[in-house]
Amino acid sequence: MSDTPVEDKKAKYQRVAYYPGCALEGTGHAYNRSTKAVGKALGLELDEVKNWNCCGAMEVKNIDPKIQTYLSSRVMSIAANEMHADVVMAPCNGCYHNLKKAEHDLAHDAGSREVVDRISQKAGHATYQAGQLETIHALDWIKQGVGEEELKKRVKNSLKGLKVANYYGCMYTRPRHIFPEKDRGPGSESTSQPHFMDDLLEAAGAENVDFALKTACCGGAHTLSDSDTSTKLVLNILRAAEAAGADVIATECPTCHSGLEMHQVRAETVLGQKTTVKMMYFTQLLGVALGLAPRKVGLHENVSDGIELLKSKGLE
Amino acid sequence: MPIHEQSLIRPENLKTHDKLVIDGIDVSGHWSTFIESRVVTDYNERLQEEIAALPGGEHIHRCWQCGSCTNSCTVNAVNPDFNPRYWIYLIRLGMESELLRDKDIIWQCVSCNKCTYACPRDVFPEGVMKATAHWLELKGHTPKSKSMHFDEEFSEQVVATGKIEEGRIIRGFFARTAQPLMQPWLIEMARRLARHLPIKLGMLMGLAALIRPRTRRWGKARRALEEYVDEQQTKQRAALGLGDLVEMAKAELNGAGKRG
């Protein structure tokens, strides 16, 4: 899969099965909206996975990892066997991670295969077989389905003058073994220094700052159950972005995004530590660059209000 | 960040005399410091097997104590007492009482997987942390952590309907952990969100709270998952030597019933 030539990927990613996941129907609604809007503006097509279920996020695996593998496999089984898709795209890092992990476990662990097959049979659907589907992130979809050159041609409002810290979080790059297509030299994504979001936003005219905490953890798994730790971790990320001169932290995950927003407010209310950097989904920024109205990409749904900032940069 | 090493000497075992003269030499104060020896007699020789029997703990035996996990750990940077390498060491030696000294913080692992990324032996330390937290609760050493309450609320909703609804999870979690929902910072967040939120979205979110999102034709999957969970829980309890207790209690009850 990772050896597919660039031009073939363009064709392959033109129309993909779309797995939005639970968060994109709730707190991540703006991410769902902006992903669809940007896809449409770039001529890419999405086919939502029919009657999908939750992937288990970061919680179900703590009860039993194989249940999580089953949950992801059911989504992939529908995409592959009922919709006959080759590629499924998940914009949420949690969903993307879990589908990738299920793919890995089903390919390498007989125990996982046995449990998934048993539950799938009882549930009355075809068992997903490793290799039937390629799982990609929204970043892969735009970076490899469109590419920077094409994106540059379509930019109407360059993000020139906007300083961006690109924040990728944990689940997009770790653990390494579930992402066999990464770290494969030029053109591929890096797990230690991811750059796909940087590449896309740079093509849209943004000025990416040198940000050391790209893959630091926001404490999303314990955002409510250990809020004090999460607030400390988030504050660290926000401060590092501000120190690097960023106006905006670009995000690519609804859990990271709402975690950063929530604990920015919590740091201010509980600890009296105020930070002013804004959070925006990378698809919101791309949308603005492509000339879409801020409401079209759901900027008014963000807790950290970036509309004024964009106005001050002449981007609205 | 250097590896934080737990001091092997407990502060309460350091003995100092304010006034002490030995053979005519004044050794008062820190000159007279002694370390009271301690003998570990309560090894649990099955500790590693017990952890390995729980999901995530399977590969603990591979560890060769390089410390990459602790060195890369997100939580260790916030709290130096959070030390995965040390806990793996204690588990492999069977030093249960030493491990229990840190029982209230082990659940705090944030699953960032930096340890798994750094580990040269594929121990999957993140999984070992989850298995250890799980073990502490199953053995009754700690009450259910807030994290476990959250995981259970979440998982029960997924198994029941195939999907989750965030508002319901938050309400359920605060209820389970007996915390007031009206946290000042949550109110402040809602206030900021309401600034631009159109009425339409507000209505949608209200409807989402009333109409439960669910996956259609989920019933069979639900029953299959419930069966699997029961089966796994019985297996895990047996591996921890807890299954026998349940059987014994049942037998006891039956006996009492017959005698009655």
Image (cartoon, rainbow, N blue to C red):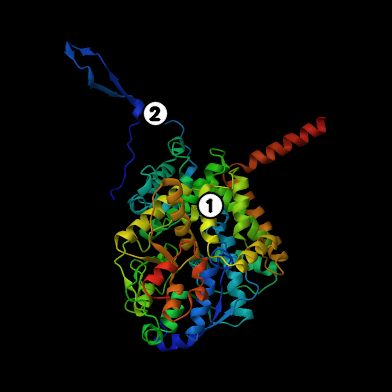
B144 lies above or below B168: above
Discs 1/2, front: 1
List x then y, in percent, for residue B221.
68, 65
Residue B165, image quadrant? bottom right
**Badge 1 vs badge 2, beta-carbon distance below 8 Å:** no
Labelled disc at residue B214: none
Report in which chain the residue with disc 1 lies.
Answer: B
> Does the image show residue A131?
no
Residue B53 visible within the image:
yes
Q: Which of A46/B102 is in front?
A: A46
Residue B214: name its quadrant: bottom right
Q: Are marks 1 and 2 on the same chain?
A: yes
| Residue denoted by label 2 | B39
Question: Where, quadrant-wise, is the C terminus of chain B in this rendering?
Answer: top right
Q: Which residue is mark 1?
A: B186
User: Residue A281 location in percent, x, y?
Assistant: 45, 69
Task: Compute the Cα span from label 1 to label 2.
Answer: 50 Å
Above or below, A71 relative to A35:
above
Q: Secondary structure at mark 1?
A: helix
Label 2 neighbour load within 10 Å: few <14, some 14-19, many 20+: few
Q: Chain of mark 2?
A: B
> Nearest the camera: B98 or B2?
B2
Going by the numbered disc 2, the residue's amino acid type is Val
Residue type, numbered disc 1:
Leu
Foreground of the two, B229 or A42: A42
